[in-house]
Amino acid sequence: MHTHEEVTPLDAFFSFLTVIAIGGFALIALVLVLLAIPQTRFKSTLTEFLAWLGFVGASGLVVSPLDLIPDVIPVIGWADDAGYVLLALACAYLGWKQRQHRRTTDPVIDMEPTSRFSKEHTHFWQMKDAAQHGRPS
């Protein structure tokens, strides 16, 4: 027969916390790998997204009733909230600057239809090809 073991709320909480921690570490690893990619449109978009995500997260911590230091402790209890506000403002500034940078220097937007080689290179290769085949350039 199958025995049923009782799962306590504390066990369920720690199981949930384990899943969240593993998912968080996997997400951090993915972001670090993506940020190691040379400058691409995806990287700049990801950087902007992470800055805005930091803004939303820090803003959420400001209004959250959960604090690193309880607010019942005068001055010190409010310091973590002030830190969250500064973090939210910094993330918003970084997200805004990244968006401005991406919009002004995006290679897809700014790319002009040009040939792969300049006229000097093309002329050089035509002269070299003509010399190999014994034709005048």
Image: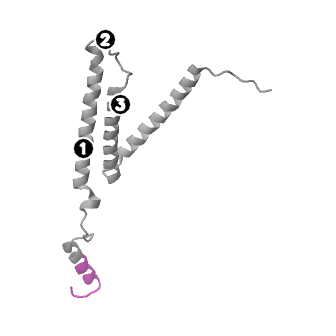
* Residue at numbered disc 2: 73
Report x, y in % for residue 85. 27, 28
Label pair 1/3, CB-CB below 8 angstroms:
no
Give the residue drawn at x 72%, y 24%. Answer: 4
Q: Is residue 37 left or right of residue 134?
A: right
Q: Nearer the viewer, residue 91 or 63?
A: 63
In this rendering, the count of numbered labels is 3
Task: Calculate the distance from the C-alpha at mark 1 to the C-alpha at mark 2.
Answer: 35 Å
Reading the image, the residue beneath label 3 is 60
Q: Secondary structure at mark 2?
A: loop
Q: Residues within 10 Å of mark 2 (few under 14, many from 20)?
A: few
Q: Amino acid at mark 3?
A: Gly
SS type, badge 1: helix
Q: Quadrant of residue 113?
A: bottom left
Kindly check if marks 1 and 2 are in contact, taking CB atoms under 8 A apart as contact: no
Residue positioned most to the top? 73
- Along the viewing direction, whichever of 37 and 59 lies nearer the viewer: 59
Contact, CB < 8 Å: mark 3 with mark 2?
no
